[in-house]
Image (cartoon, rainbow, N blue to C red):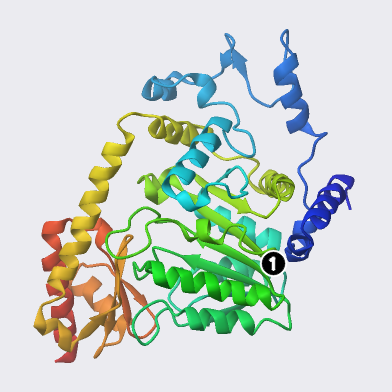
Amino acid sequence: MNPLAESLNKTIEEKQTNVYEMLSSLGKNIYFPKEGIISQSAEAGKKAKKYNATIGIAIENKNPMHLKVIQNTLSEYAPKDIYPYAPPAGKPELRKVWLEKMIKESPTLKNKKISNPIVTNALTHGISIVSDLFAEPGDSVIYPDKNWENYELTFGIRRGTKTVNFPLYNENRNFNASGLKEAILAQKDKGKAIVVLNFPNNPTGYTPSQEDSENIVNAILAGAEEGINIVVVTDDAYYGLFFEDSIHESLFGQLANIHPNVLAIKVDGATKEDYVWGFRVGFITFAANSETVNAALEQKTMGIIRATISSGSHPSQTFVLHALQSPEYEQQKFEKYTIMKGRANKVKEILKNEQFQAVWDYYPFNSGYFMCLELKTIDAEKLRVHLLDKYEIGTIALGEKDLRVAFSCIEEDDLEDLFNKIYQGIEDLSS
C-alpha cells in the first residue's frame, strides 16, 4: 500500500475508527499523489515566475492558447478561467461559494463539522465516488422501492453490492420510516449498511414532512446504536424545489455528526437546481465527526477523481460560479421556481377530475420535477408504448403499474391536454 494511503488510513482510524471500517478496499488504498504531475505543477504555479514548463497546456502571449472561433462566443470570460485544467477538487472560489450557499439554505448545518464541497462531474459521478470509497461486494445498499435506476448500476453492477428495498410509503402514504429502520437493523450481522435517501424523490416528486424526517433520523440512529456502521447518502439532485408541506432543507443537516457510527454524505449540484443539466457540475460533501477525518476523505476523493476523470470541466465551473455571484441570481432562480410550482399545482388541480379516479391513483408529490401515476387497469409499459405510438407522448413506465410524468418539461397550459390524452390512451387499451 502506498505510504500516502497508509497515512490517510492511520489518520481516519485514529480519529474515527468507525469511518475507517466503512471504507471499501479501494477506499483504503486510494490516495491523492503529492509528488506527481499535479502537485509539482501546483508548486510551479506559485514559484515559476520566469518559465513554467510543467503542465500539459499551451501558452500564447501569456494566456492559455485558444481558438478565436471558441473565444468569440465566450468573450465575457478571461481565457485563464475557461481553458486551463481545473484543480481535481474543483475551482476553490466555487467550492467556497457553494459551501456558503449550503449553510445559508440549511441552517441546521451551522456549527456542524463538514468538509469543503468537492466538485464532481454532476451527481452520478458523486454517487459513483461514494460507491468506490465505501461499497464492497456483498455490502447492503438500502433505498426505497421507488428510486432512480442508476443506483443499481452504480452500486450493484459496478461494485457488486446487494440491493435492499423497502416501500417508500407506509399505509398512510407518508414516508415509511419503519421500513427503513427494519432494513437497517437487518444488517446487524454484517455490521455495515449504506443508505441512499433521495428527496425530492425521483420518480415520485415526494419529500417528507418535518415529522417524517425526524422519524428517518431516528431510524438511522436506531441502527447506529445497535453498532451498525451506516454510510447515509443524501442525493439532493432536485434540492430547493419544495412546493408544499415538506421539509425545506436537506436531510444532510439533520444527519451530520449525529453519531460516531453514522457518516452522512451530501451529493448535490447545479445540474438541476440551476437548470444547467449539460454543464455537469455537482458536489460531494462529507460530515464525519472529525475535521481531520473530513480532510482525509477529501484527499481520498481527490484520488478517485484523479484516477477517473482527472478533473471536472473548467468552463462549466466558471459559468456556475459567475451565476452564483451575480446579484440577479436569487431573483431569476425564484422566477423559475414559481413556474415549476405552478406546474405542480396545476397537475394536482387536474388530477381532481372524477373520471380519472377509476383508472389511476397518484403517489403523494410535493416537490421536484416529477409525479407518478399508479395505474389501476392497464399495464404501464403497454400504456407507455401506446401513448408514444398513437399520441406522440413520452412517459416513463416503472414496473407493472407506475407511470412517471415529468411536469417539469410541460408548459402549464398544456398539462390538462397531456393528462386527458393519457386517460384516452387507457380508454383505447381498455376497449
Q: Position of residue 311 (x, y in %)?
A: 62, 39
Farthest residue in the front direction? 111
* Front-lying residue, 176 or 56: 176
Q: Locate residue 313 relative to residue 423 in the image: left or right.
A: right
Find residue 46 and report its image quarter: top right
Q: Residue at x 45, y 50 (%)?
A: 106
Q: Locate residue 49 relative to residue 327 in the image: left or right.
A: right
Q: Residue at x 45, y 82 (%)?
A: 167
Total numbered labels: 1
| Residue 176 visible in rendering | yes
Q: Position of residue 88 (x, y in %)?
A: 64, 38
Q: Position of residue 259 (x, y in %)?
A: 65, 64
Q: Position of residue 289 (x, y in %)?
A: 68, 55
Q: Is residue 361 above or below residue 116?
A: below
Q: Which residue is mark 1?
A: 261
Q: Is residue 230 above or below residue 411?
A: below
Q: Secondary structure at mark 1?
A: loop
| Residue 161 visible in rendering | no
Q: Is residue 91 above or below residue 176?
A: above
* Disc 1 crowd, CA 10 A, few/some/many (<14, 14-19, 20+): many
Find residue 147 and report its image quarter: bottom left
Quadrant of the rendering where the C terminus is positioned: bottom left
Q: Residue at x 59, y 32 (%)?
A: 86
Find residue 403 and report its image quarter: bottom left
Q: Locate residue 50 relative to residue 281 in the image: left or right.
A: right
Q: Amino acid at mark 1?
A: Asn
* Front-lying residue, 248 or 165: 248
* Front-lying residue, 387 or 54: 54
